[in-house]
Amino acid sequence: MRQFTSLFLLLFVFLSAKALGQTENAIVGVWYNTEKDAKVQIEKKGDAYFGKIVWLREPVRDGKPVLDSNNSDRKLQTRPILGMTILEGLKYSGGAWKNGKIYDPKSGNTYSCEVKLTNKGLLEVKGYMGFSFIGRTVEWSRAE
């Protein structure tokens, strides 16, 4: 009976750890932004999550790739938006991914970022400066 209890406890710990890993990695994949004019692929690297733009509805303008022209750093204004990393350093904690940064190529600004997965399968992506309760939250949907 003691071996059965030990085996059951070991199985429970293993399955709990696996379920936690699935929850933690639930944001991994490709997501449409709010306007559905871009897709962002979120991946885990080490213990943090990163997202890069892997598709644009209009990747070319006037025969040239769309560039990061709104960036305040002149050196970065010539980089293409397609392939650009816009989410950096998110870490899973308490049911959300926190302490990251998000870059908005439309404004050229970088914000602190927090992400939550809703029960509807949407990502609530919050960008803010300073305090997390002051900011803007948008919803991203999973791309299939």
Image (tube, rainbow, N blue to C red):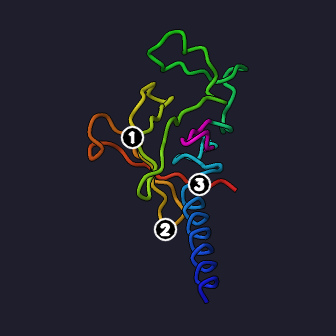
Q: Nearer the viewer, mark 3 or mark 1?
A: 3
Q: Which residue is mark 1?
A: 127
Q: Which residue is mark 2?
A: 119
* Sequence-wise first label, 3 or 2: 3
Q: Residue at x 66, y 34 (%)?
A: 58
Q: Nearer the viewer, mark 3 or mark 2?
A: 3
Outermost residue to the top: 75
User: Label 1: how many residues lie within 10 Å, few (<14), some (14-19) or many (20+)?
Assistant: many
Q: Secondary structure at mark 2?
A: loop
The secondary structure that dominates the magenta segment is strand
Magenta region includes residue 45: yes
Q: Residue at x 54, y 56 (%)?
A: 24
Residue 27 visible in the shown view:
yes
Q: Which residue is mark 3?
A: 25
Q: Position of residue 11 (x, y in %)?
A: 63, 74
- Segment tinted magenta in the rendering: 42-52
Left or right relative to 138: residue 21: right
Q: Residue at x 63, y 43 (%)?
A: 43
Left or right relative to 29: residue 135: left
